Amino acid sequence: MLLPMRGDFLATNEPTWGSWYWPSWFVGAIGLLFLVPECIALATNTANTLSWYVWRLTGEFVPGERGLWNWSALHVLIGGLLTVLFLWLIGHLVFGLWT
């Protein structure tokens, strides 16, 4: 059941679990699950980075070989979707749009 939104909704409710959950989720998801392994891979063997994994998985792109001309329609679609997602997140979280 959805409750109706009031104009003073944000001012009257104090966060409970959200004030610790979201920062720890962000640090855990971005910091531990991505940055730590990525930095280790960059320091030891660049073939273990996320970029190289994706390039091996698709089998179509090798750095330094034909550049963007090697992209398929799926690459362009995924890139476009990620661009829209990131622009929406920046607009929503940084500028308070679309609330």
Image (cartoon, rainbow, N blue to C red):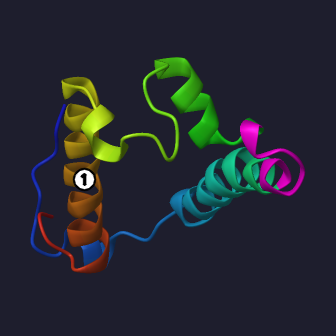
Classify 77 as above or below 46: above
Q: Is 15 placed left or right of 5 in the picture?
A: right
Q: Is 18 placed left or right of 25 in the picture?
A: left
**Mark 1, residues whose alpha carbon is within 10 Å: few (<14), some, or many (≥20)?**
few
Q: Main secondary structure of the magenta part?
A: helix
The residue under label 1 is which amino acid type?
Thr
Residue nearer the viewer, 20 or 81: 81
The quadrant the N terminus occupies is top left
Q: Mark 1 — residue?
A: 83
Q: Where does residue 38 sit, x and y in percent of width and height?
A: 73, 50
In the orientation shown, which residue stands out farthest toward the right?
44
Q: Where does residue 50 sit, x and y in percent of width and height?
A: 62, 40
Q: Is 59 placed left or right of 9 in the picture?
A: right
The quadrant the C terminus occupies is bottom left
Q: How many marks?
A: 1
Magenta segment: does it hold 23? no
Q: Which residue occupies 26% across, 72% down?
A: 10
Q: Which residue occupies 86% across, 57% down?
A: 43
Classify 25 as above or below 10: above
Residue nearer the viewer, 38 or 87: 38
Give the magenta-colored segment's residue range.
Answer: 40-47
Q: Which residue occupies 17% across, 76% down?
A: 8
Q: Where does residue 31 sit, x and y in percent of width and height?
A: 70, 58
Question: In terms of secondary structure, where does tag 1 sit?
Answer: helix
Residue nearer the viewer, 17 or 50: 50
Q: Is 54 placed left or right of 50 in the picture?
A: left
Residue nearer the viewer, 50 or 65: 65
Q: Which residue occupies 49% across, 47% down?
A: 64
In the orientation shown, which residue stands out farthest toward the front?
65
